[in-house]
């Protein structure tokens, strides 16, 4: 059995895998898709994403300050980005951003899947939180993020058209 939990959610976007990848490889874009409960105060990063490169996020989640030091585990242009965390509220963190072409519906698009492997600290208490609260938190967060990402690319397409 794995030593972590798994959350996965997908969305179809009206943009090419290259456009969606380019957007996600820049951690500064988190402020464009974050739910209201997450306020981005500072982002330090290098673009383009390269495996091993670190990025820093200073945020407020539900009003609580949080510093997150992440790093790129994988960066395969137009296909996938995988980030890990050196410093975060999690004991284990791997966030896979997967980008697959989707030509259904008569136009070019992307099916983007967020696959999060995570483990909370605090032993049995962390496990209890995972089973009761984290699924709801992740579901709400990724519904909001996917809705905002979809709107971002729809607005971009409307400006171009």
Image: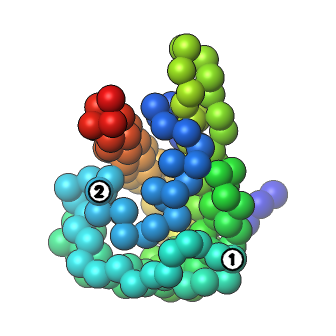
Residue at 33% from the left image edge and 36% from the top image edge: 160
Kindly identify which residue carries mark 2. Answer: 32
Q: Nearer the viewer, residue 104 or 136?
A: 104
Looking at the picture, does residue 130 appear above or below residue 52?
above
Kindly identify which residue carries mark 1. Answer: 51
Residue at 49% from the left image edge and 37% from the top image edge: 15
Looking at the picture, does residue 100 appear above or below residue 39?
above
Residue 47: give x, y in percent of width and height.
51, 75
Residue at 62% from the left image edge and 23% from the top image edge: 103
Residue 13: give x, y in percent of width and height.
47, 34
Q: Which of 47 and 72 is in front in this view?
A: 47
Residue at 69% from the left image edge and 77% from the top image edge: 51
Q: Can residue 4 be seen in this view?
A: no
In primary-sequence order, the first of circles 2 and 1 is 2
In the picture provided, is 35 more to the left or to the right than 21?
left
Q: Residue furthest front?
A: 161
Secondary element at image label 2: helix
* Circles 2, 1 touching at the beta carbon (< 8 Å): no
* Disc 2 packing (10 Å; few <14; some 14–19; many ≥20): few
Secondary element at image label 1: loop
């Amino acid at each position: 059995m794995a030593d972590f939990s798994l959350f996965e959610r997908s969305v179809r976007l009206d943009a090419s895998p290259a456009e969606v990848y380019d957007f996600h490889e820049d951690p500064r874009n988190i402020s464009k898709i974050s739910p209201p409960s997450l306020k981005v105060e500072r982002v330090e990063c290098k673009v383009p994403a390269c495996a091993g490169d670190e990025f820093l996020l200073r945020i407020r989640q539900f009003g609580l300050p949080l510093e997150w030091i992440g790093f790129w585990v994988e960066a395969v242009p137009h296909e996938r980005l995988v980030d890990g965390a050196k410093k975060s509220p999690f004991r284990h963190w791997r966030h896979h951003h997967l980008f697959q072409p989707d030509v259904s519906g008569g136009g070019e698009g992307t099916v983007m899947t967020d696959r999060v492997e995570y483990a909370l600290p605090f032993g049995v208490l962390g496990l209890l939180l995972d089973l009761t609260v984290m699924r709801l938190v992740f579901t709400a967060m990724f519904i909001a993020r996917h809705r905002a990402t979809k709107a971002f690319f729809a607005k971009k397409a409307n400006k171009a058209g």
